[in-house]
Image: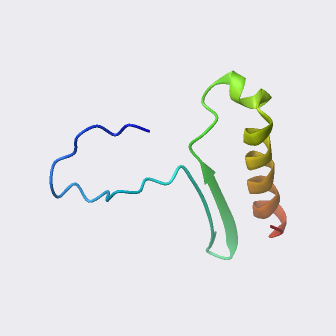
Amino acid sequence: VDWGPRGKGHGMGALHPLAWYHNYDGGRAFYTALGHLPTNFSEPAFLNHLYAGILWAATGKK
């Protein structure tokens, strides 16, 4: 990801996660910024990422 030049005080820091998961309000939340293109859904690595996130959100299993 190329974020281009940023001014001082922007507050985003050097790292920009594209996916994360966490416990929230008694449940589980999974987010991914990946998968914008239809071709992503034929990529085994992306499908594994998506499956693992959904599995964790649904069951808590890693």
Q: Is residue 59 above or below residue 34?
A: below
Q: Residue furthest bottom?
A: 26
Percent of width and height locating residue 24: 61, 72
Q: Is residue 39 above or below residue 61?
A: above
Q: Nearer the viewer, residue 53 or 46?
A: 46
Q: Residue furthest left?
A: 8
Percent of width and height locating residue 46: 72, 40
Q: Nearer the viewer, residue 31 or 46?
A: 46
Q: Nearer the viewer, residue 60 or 8?
A: 8
Q: Is residue 22 left or right of residue 43?
A: left
Which quadrant, please, contains the N terminus?
top left
Residue 56 position by quadrant:
bottom right
Q: Is residue 21 left or right of residue 8?
A: right
Percent of width and height locating residue 35: 64, 34
Q: Is residue 41 above or below residue 8?
A: above
Number of numbered discs on residues: 0
The residue depicted at 61 percent of the width and 74 percent of the height is 25
The residue depicted at 23 percent of the width and 40 percent of the height is 5
Q: Is residue 28 left or right of residue 36?
A: right
The residue depicted at 65 percent of the width and 62 percent of the height is 29
Which quadrant, please, contains the C terminus?
bottom right
